[in-house]
Amino acid sequence: MTKEIFSVWEGVYGRFKEVKGDLGVFESDHWLNRQKEKLQRALKDFESQVSYCKDYPLPIVVAMLIGKRYGGGGAKLKVFDFGGGVGLQYLDLIAKVPLAEQLVEYTILDNQRTIDTACGCMRQFENLKFLADISEGEADIVHMGSSLQYVEDWQDLLTKLNKIYKPSYFVFSDLLAGNTPSFVSSQIYFGKKIPNKFLNIEEFTGFLKGLGFQVSFRSKFMRVILNQDQIFPNHALPSSHRIDRAVNLICHRQ
């Protein structure tokens, strides 16, 4: 039997006074004590440079750039999504950013079998294309969502992408990075083992700085499944090599 969830709201009214509410709640001890507890937790997170985000940050960057660019007209925004799979992030983008389907040229790079799986369903989107190999081009944004961990020589890849596409932004979503040593682990996937690269966050951001990029946004990525925050499943690693969350980074060219 499904447990009934308590409703925070009840009743339908036309005006505030019909509710006959308790407006003094915002000065009550219970309310203020709750706010103080939240503030103490927030200060602790701030001092630890911790913040949380339940979404990939790419739609935010695209929305802001569209607003800036199309205030006075301009060419379409170009996004290159490395390891973008079958296009789930593209669908998320155009659902959240109303103008993105018309004003963004979105290119996904992935393996040919993944592309073949997606193409039949995604042909309706005129500004979406798939590539199986890196080719010459340009991009305003290079995005990597849960994909960089599958690249061992990530320094060479980022250097190559920076040189070819000359992006104004690198956006990393669900990046396996933290205050641990950089190391390789094995991701267990339905009985298979996939090599994964965990990155030291300071080493990673330092490398980006060497490419000419500054971190302008950083949060821990909170993956939510069926309205439940998913515990990060790395308890089998040594404690010195565990992270409690992956991270999101937005990096702009200086």
Image (cartoon, grey):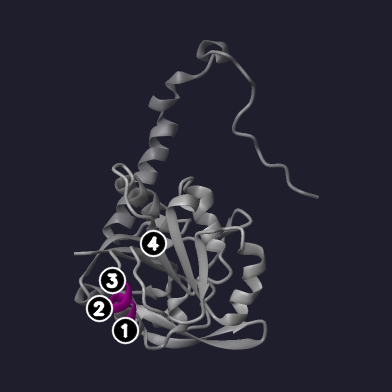
| Mark 2–mark 1 CB contact (< 8 Å) | yes
- What residue sits right under mark 3 in the picture? 166
- What residue sits right under mark 1 in the picture? 155
Q: Tag 4: residue type?
A: Lys
Q: Is residue 144 magenta?
A: no
| Mark 4–mark 3 CB contact (< 8 Å) | no
| Labels 1, 3: front one | 3
Q: CA distance from mark 1 to mark 3?
A: 16 Å
Mark nearer the N terminus (4 vs 3): 4
Residue 30: x and y, percent?
44, 33
Mark nearer the N terminus (1 vs 4): 4
Question: What residue is at 45 percent from the left and 25 percent from the top?
Answer: 25
Question: What residue is at 55 percent from the left and 72 percent from the top?
Answer: 85
What's the magenta region?
Answer: 160-166
Mark nearer the N terminus (2 vs 4): 4
* Between 210 and 126, the one nearer to me in the picture: 126
Q: CA distance from mark 4 to mark 3?
A: 11 Å
